[in-house]
Image (tube, rainbow, N blue to C red):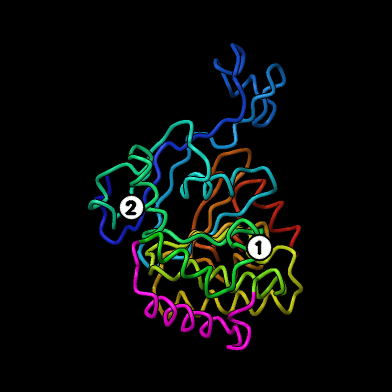
Amino acid sequence: MIDEAGMAMRIEGLSRTFGPGCARCAGDRESSLERNYCPDCGTVYALRDLSLELYDGEVLGVVGESGSGKSTILNCLYFDLAPTSGSAFISSYRGGERDIFSVSSQERRAIRNRLLGKVYQNPTQGLRMSFSAVSNIAERMIASGSRNVSAMEARAVSLLSHVNIAPLRMREAPERFSGGMQQRVQIAKALSTNPPILLLDEVTTGLDLSVQAKVLDLIKEIQRELGISMLLVSHDLGVIRMLADRTLVMLDGRIVESGLTDQVLEDPQHPYSQELVHSML
């Protein structure tokens, strides 16, 4: 349950495993696992008893190497993956008193469509590539209960204009867009239902540097204008430094360090955090 003032979301004891588990890793995991992997049965412990808080209007950065579990957090929150255990509470859902992982599939769809927005690293996961940009936005609005066609179209045009998609291209399919344009359409789609929380998964990976800068500027502008809480996953400390108010450092499915972004990046305490920061210098 959420009871702290100004908290948008809380995650408690979130775990996600991939594999059957065995007698070895079911016992003393600290000594039996190789990092987060069981060599006997091949089970991967992607998230291990993870807890975090996201505050209203905050950008919380999550950084770590590939396989650290950072994207798995977003996949669980957006119901792309079922958690093995744990709970999550959103203040705008039933007063923050109901675990979103315990509700019905119908309720999960409502949470996903109305209270959360997600921008995927790979746009093909977040967009229907053969639908027009306008239709992509309308699809999400229909899923959230909208039925007024003219209102949906007006909303789509407004959002696409806001993310700098030219009017002449709004009726085109994203499969004809550049990677940066596809990400901007994803952002517009995610914002279409005014969700209080936005999940951003490696949104600049694979983009040219100039395109990355435009996407990051857009995210920063949206956060400043709308005050949306954002959970931002990235392996790029430059992205984290630019956008995140606080930062969590993950390794092998666990948070090994947390704090204000400037504090974590300028004076890292954990050896892995120090290694990350030094690799950026």
Q: Residues within 10 Å of mark 1 (few under 14, many from 20)?
A: many
**Was residue 61 drawn as part of the magenta stretch in this picture?**
no
User: Is residue 245 or residue 229 the one in the foreground?
Assistant: 229
Q: Is residue 85 above or below residue 138?
A: above
Q: Quadrant of residue 88?
A: top left
Q: Secondary structure at mark 2?
A: strand
Q: Position of residue 132 (x, y in %)?
A: 59, 73
Q: With 271 as the anchor, is 49 left or right in this view? A: left
Q: With 127 as the anchor, is 144 left or right in this view? A: left
**Was residue 167 drawn as part of the magenta stretch in this picture?**
yes
Q: Position of residue 242 (x, y in %)?
A: 59, 72
Q: Residue under label 2, please give it.
A: 90
Q: Are marks 1 and 2 in contact (CB under 8 Å)?
A: no
Q: Residue at x 24, y 46 (%)?
A: 97
Q: Residue under label 1, please give it.
A: 237
Judged by depth in the image, the label closer to the viewer, 1 or 2, is: 2
Q: Residue at x 41, y 58 (%)?
A: 113
Q: Position of residue 14 (x, y in %)?
A: 46, 38
